[in-house]
Image: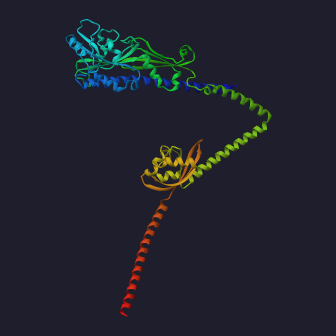
Amino acid sequence: MVLAGLLWKILSDVQINKAANDFGQQADEVSDTLHLKTQRDVYLLGSLRGLFVASDVVERDEFNSFIDALNLSETYPGVYSIGYVEKVTAENKEPFIESVRQDTSYNPNGYPDFNITPAGERPEYFALKFASPEAKFTSVLGFDYLTDETRWPTLRQVAEKKQAMLSPVIPSLINDGDLLMIALPIFYNQTTANTGELQGFLLVGLKADIFFPQLFSGMSASADFLDVHIYDETNGETLLYNFSPGNDQLVNQGSVLEKDIPLAVAGRQWKLRFYASSDYNLTVQEIWTPWVAALGIVLLGLLLFIVFRISFGAQIKAIRLAEAMTKNLRDSEIKFRLLFEDLTDAVFIHNLEGQFLMVNKAACQRLGYSKAEFLNFTLAKVDAPEFAAQVPQRIAKLQEIGKATFESVHLNKNGERIPVEINSSIINYQGRPAILSIARDISERKKHDEELRLRGEELERLNKNMVGRELKMVELKEEIERLKGNKG
């Protein structure tokens, strides 16, 4: 019973650790993905800023064509809107308004009702000039962000720090829900140092109820068992989003996993708080394993007790038999290792990917590597390039037919080529399929074959010369006979 309890405790701890590790990895994946996607939207603004840097004046049709080419719904899912806010001085107010009203580059009808809102005289204005999708935001074109207490603090910080920044949760200009705004400053005579006079701001709107759900849509299935709370801690703690697919009660449960991950996002400090049940990502089989194992130990103990009582002698005999089998197995392993090391041929054992698992002394001496070096090599290290390319096909053939004999060329540590004949077989090594290869050095055979080939060629040349001479003799005799005939 004590052993069963101990086993249950050990296996339970293993399962708890597995669940905690899986939970931690999944939380890190969510955090990394969120950071990547927010940075992606910052880079989107950076690419759009390049349009303004490259041209003194960006027309409305250029702006909208650039946005349309991005295919936002596919490439940047979660992006709700993109806009451009331009700084307008009091003396340029009326010319600015008139230029927008007469702008037909994108809308043939222009914008006859355009005006800066809310009305009033101010030293300067920051008016929404472009917005995409335009059809949705036409009614708020001209809105002065300087008058908006929810938006202007973020834009002011963006102008001061001259870098992209993220806003807190703010209401949409068209009152269709809350959103997050990423803003990037644009300067006249823009340089990489962000110097020059402020021209305006580029804005990306992210609807929380669109952006965050699509973040989790691409996750692995195990993410569905997480409860994720996303907080903005820049000024206090504000809940931005709660992802709880059927697990909203996890927070109130006693046995849960919990992890907080801080995340810096475009000038704001977020915190991701993750919850999961203590059996997170465990299968039913894994959950029940400690109990089944403990029960198995109890039943096994009872069975052994009964067997011991019934046949103490048989138990002793079984123990001795097991000891004898273990000794025989150990002796067999010793004999195998002695035979393995004493072979004059190079012997290699490698896995199905070509990674060496074991080599003998002859292999080390022939190729000039130590056994420790071999264990860090694959076949590609010792096979000549023209034969290394054939390794995958040879392994596939071995798996199909079980054994094969072929020739190859090995390269020793000095780069010398050694022709070899290899006999390979599929074996079971430490419980896994592997390949045993015995490589015989056939350098002498190749040298002898080459000598025989050269001798054969020499004999063939001499034979051709002899035949040529005999034909000349025959022709000479025929000429002599002809001359004798003419003389007679």
Tell whether 166 sits left or right of 18: left
The residue closer to the viewer here, 197 or 76, is 76
**Residue 77 in sight here:** yes
**Residue 285's quadrant in the figure?**
top right
Looking at the image, residue 410 lies above or below residue 185: below
Quarter of the rendering occupied by the N terminus: top right
The residue closer to the viewer here, 484 or 189, is 484
The residue closer to the viewer here, 6 or 400, is 400
**Residue 46 in sight here:** no
Residue ranking furthest to the top: 120
Tell whether 76 sits left or right of 26: left
Quarter of the rendering occupied by the C terminus: bottom left
Residue ranking furthest to the front: 109
At a point 53% along the width and 25% down the height, the residue shown is 222
At a point 27% along the width and 14% down the height, the residue shown is 111
Residue ranking furthest to the right: 310
- x%, y% of residue 219? 48, 25
- x%, y% of residue 239? 45, 13
**Residue 70's quadrant in the figure?**
top left
The total of numbered circles placed on residues is 0
Looking at the image, residue 368 lies above or below residue 255: below
At a point 56% along the width and 45% down the height, the residue shown is 434
Tell whether 436 sits left or right of 120: right
The residue closer to the viewer here, 313 or 74, is 74
- x%, y% of residue 43? 34, 25
Residue ranking furthest to the left: 91
